[in-house]
Amino acid sequence: MNKKEKILVLDDDPDIGTMIKMMLEYKGYSVTVSERAEQANEVLKNDEFDLIIMDMLLSGVNGTDLCSEFKKDNSIAHIPVIMISAHPNAKEICLQAGADEFISKPFDMQDILSKIDRLIHNSKITER
Amino acid sequence: MNNFFRRLPLTTKLLLLTLVPILLIVYLSIEIYHQKTRNVQLIQGYIERIDESADIAELIASLQTECRHSFAYALTRDINSHTQMETQRLVTDLAIKKLDQRNDSTLRNFEDYTSLKNLNGVRASIDSGTSQDIVMQYYTTAIFRLNTLNVVVPAGNNSYLKPVFNDLITQKILSEMATYLGIIRSNFYNVLYTRKNMVGILYGLSGIFDLYKSYEIELLTKASPPFLEEYKKVSQNTALRPTMRYINKTFQKSYFDSLYDAETWWKISAAGIDQLKDLQQNIIKRVQASMNTVYNKEVMGQQSALALLIIAVLVVFAIMFYTTQVITHLLTGLNEAAQKIARGITGVEIKNVSHDVIGSLGESILKIDAHNKQLAEAADAIGKGNFNVPFDPRSADDVLGAAIIRMKENLRRFTMEIEKSKEQFREVADSAPVMIWMTDENKQCNFVNKGWLNFSGRKKEQELGYGWIEGMHPDDYTRCAEVFDDAFVQRREYSLEYRFRREDGEYRWVRETGIPRYSAEGTFEGYIGSCIDVHETKMHEQRKDDFIRMASHELKTPVTSIKGYVQLLLTMFREHDLSKEGLYPQAIQTSLSTIDKQIIKLNRLMSELLDLSRIDSGKLELKMQNFDLNDLVKETVDDLQQTTKHQILVNNNADCKLFGDKDRISQVLLNLLTNAIKYSPKTDSIEINVCRPSQSIVSISVKDNGIGIDKKDHEKIFERFYRVEGKTEQTYPGFGIGLFIASEIINRHNGTISVESEKSKGSTFTFTLPITEN
């Protein structure tokens, strides 16, 4: 790993956010956690990310709507998005909103890591 | 014969009937005509006979006159007598010729036996001077002979001759009398002229005079009273009287007195005889006239008989023809009326009904018609519910009338029962605490109960038809209309929920159920149904669902957190080999692993609870989409394979796409696989078989070699909360609702789910799904 891939985690539950941050940082990613959806746009402008992990339910903002916005924004549309939800049946909605992957809560660490790896890897191949 | 006559057309029958009297009349008329003709011929014969008699009488008279003149000439030889004689001879010849021309057999060669063939010889001898006695002799003989020819035919019972018979006899007698009188007269003349042989001649003449008198007596006996009257006048007032007086006196005295000289006697007696001749000729003329009258009458009768015959035939024929026409017309009228009645028409008309059997038939038909009309009106009135319509049977035998009355009574009873039943239905419906409604076969509402009106606070008139739809929440209308229309077309029962406005304006959730209703004959009549206010329940469920959704989410957040940290710890522990630090590495790893496993179980339990809640509240929504079955099997197996030591083998013999909820079907497969893993702890292989038992069905089975299931439990394991339990078996954690949820999902996809298993010999769970797309 020559360079640390940057991952943005959007989750209004700080425990979950922190848990994912620790999990991913342990695996060598650079992780930024944002608890508030409003901050997300600012964060995304200030920094370049390789992947976004976001909860479907964020306080004040519908995660799927936010995802759709991301995918419409040319500057960030290329960033792969993994959506997380406690609803096991929400996968369809999330994929329709533009998410590249869906993971239901509670998730398996191995599962999320392999999906992140695959998405970033694919994304890099595309970039090249 | 009888049958033959019956089958003949009416006209022919009537004509046959006409023919017999006509023939009879014709026959009788011809007979009468013949009779009349015979009578006419008979009379003609009589007339001819009489004419003949007249001719004979005329000849006799001529001969008498000629005899007289000849006698006078022979006696006197004077020129005057000669001239008279000559003139008379021509008259006599004419009379002979006339008689000659009569073509009568009785007169054939009469000149032979009347010695008239010698007439010319006698005449010549007279002219040459023969004696007067010879003359008298000859003429008298001829006249006698001729008199025998003048035969009077016996009248018998001949009604035509009877009236003239006496006259015929009379004329005959008169002729005889004239002859004898002439003989007497001539001899008297001879005596008076010659004055010789007086007594001798008188003696010789007495026999002749007796004959004359006997003829006169016969005349007086046989002649008709009018003639006798006439005869009396003639014999008293004419020259006959002095003639007869002189003759009588002479015979009485046997002496010729000097009252008359020869010439005077000749003249007076001539006038006397002429009186008799006149009488005879008058009678003959009268007879001829009378016979002509009879003849003309007969001819008239004959002609009128012929005319009557023709008229009678014509009249009879005309009457028969007219009668035939009338009867045919009457019967045709009756037939038309009867046919109308047969076609069910009422109000037939029959005009000019006669007073006979046809008329009676007509009246019967009119009665039938009137009765039919009465029946129809009564039935109409009864049909309209007027059971008080007055109607009486015609007679004790009036089957139809009695049937109508029974029908009326039965209908009255049925109607009352129906009314009562309707009333009861209304009472029940009104007293029910739910809203009850009915529609007709065109979806239009035609009944709402009191409960409905109480709820909506509107009037019945406002709700009927489509008025009630105003109360429905606009957002629910389209959805409900679709469900209702669909059910209506298929005549299915249906159930749906929508918001309906209460009288206070608040929209309340109601659950409506409807079922099609049919008449007793099975005709679809619309729907009947009810609406229950489920607002509270609905709100309660809503809150429960919200709660469960929220609880599930809220529960998952800490579980996610715990699971994440545990897995992080486990990873770190494995990768960094913390055992070196002197801690209790085995204990820590075991603890973390156990926490991790239990969290998976906890998560599944929560999911199952959530699903159960959804199924119970009917909220298990399926996200239908087309998907590839192979992808689903592969993804599910791949995900699971990472977390189990069991080897999952897939035998896929079908390649197909399905239309359904991919996640839910994946959930079913996952459930079967995790069960297989869970209940086969001692083996390590699971087999998935995918195949297509038919073109439209795909079958997915999961086979394990685990502990198996007793047959008695096969059906029950798909029930909720059912768990296979036994003293000897190891207990496995879980709510026992996994298979229930699986079977719900498969059923919702119109599929089937089943199990084949034997105790200790493993289990095979199979579910099938319909293939809608290849």
Image (cartoon, coloured by chain):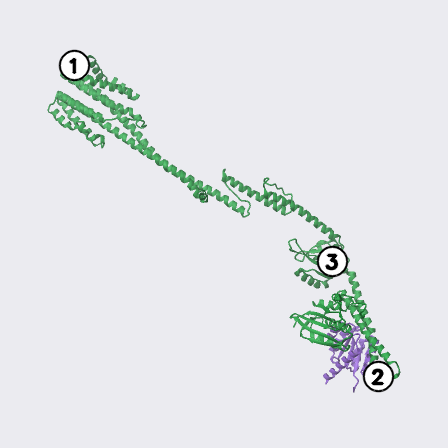
Q: Chain of mark 3?
A: B
Residue for badge 1: B199
Which of the 4 quarters of the picture holds residue B401?
A: top right
Quadrant location of the C terminus of chain B?
Answer: bottom right
User: What kind of element bears circle 3?
Assistant: strand
B582 is higher (above) or lower (below) than B242: below
Labelled pair 1, 2 in contact (Cβ < 8 Å): no
Report the residue that reaches farthest toward the right.
Answer: B582
Q: Position of residue B170 (x, y in %)?
A: 26, 23
The residue that mark 2 highlights is: B576
Q: Nearer the viewer, residue B142 or B455?
A: B142
Q: Residue at x 84, y 83 (%)?
A: B577
Q: Quadrant of residue B712?
A: bottom right
The answer to which quarter of the image holds residue B752 is: bottom right
Residue A30 x %, y %: 81, 82
Judge whether B581 appears above or below B329 on screen.
Answer: below
Q: Which chain is purple?
A: A
- Label 1 vs 2, first from the N-terminus: 1
Residue B711: which numbered mark, if any? none
Q: Nearer the viewer, mark 3 or mark 1?
A: 1
| Nearer the camera: disc 2 or disc 3 | 2
Query: Which numbered disc, 2 or 3, marks the residue that appears first in the sequence?
Result: 3
Image mark for residue B531? 3
Q: Which chain is green?
A: B
